Amino acid sequence: MWGGRAGSLLRGWGRQLTGAPGRRLLNCRAASQAGNSAPRCWKCGGPRGPAQGDGFFCPQCRALQPPDATRDYFSLMDCNRSFRIDTTKLQHRYQQLQRLVHPDLFSQRSQTEKDLSEKHSTVVNDAYRTLLAPLSRGLYLVS
């Protein structure tokens, strides 16, 4: 069902964490209780972040997380922050992100994940439309 990068992200969640020799490994909850200041997962309470892929999913429970409000459209769409961008690469990234967060994929999930999926999808659509058109891209750059 999941191919490409999405499949590798999903398969990667099952792997064990490795640490430095002589250091005790902590699970998500223990790491967050040990003073980790990373944002926490809304579902399991574990730390979330860009440790897995783009940080869209909790590495522990795989629940979709809220969009990062501090992330700009260029980093979201994996583009250089300049006026000249590769629109083919932009389109591929758009399709890749929609395969991860599109609301149709979350129809059997909790209402929270459905809502988060809609938010992510909206942000991805806005980023794509903004960066695709030269005028809006330029205005976004100067804002």
Image (cartoon, grey):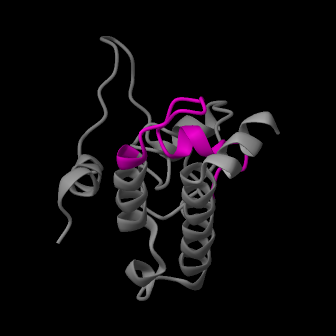
Residue drawn 61% across the image and 47% down it: 134
* Image quadrant assignment for residue 81: top right
**72 up-or-down from 60: above or below:** above
Q: Which residues are magenta?
A: 67-89
Question: In this view, which residue lies farthest toward the bottom?
Answer: 108
Q: Position of residue 108 (x, y in %)?
A: 41, 88
Q: Position of residue 99 (x, y in %)?
A: 35, 66
Residue drawn 58% across the image and 75% down it: 118
Is the C terminus in the top left, top right, bottom left or bottom right quadrant?
top right
Residue drawn 45% across the image and 67% down it: 101
* Image quadrant assignment for residue 139: top right
Is the N terminus in the top left, top right, bottom left or bottom right quadrant?
bottom left
> Viewer-proximal residue, 113 or 82?
82
> Is residue 97 shown in magenta?
no
For residue 53, side relative to residue 111 (left or right): left
* Image quadrant assignment for residue 32: top right
Q: Main secondary structure of the magenta part?
A: loop
> Viewer-proximal residue, 77 or 22?
77
For residue 33, side relative to residue 92 (left or right): right
> Viewer-proximal residue, 23 or 13?
13
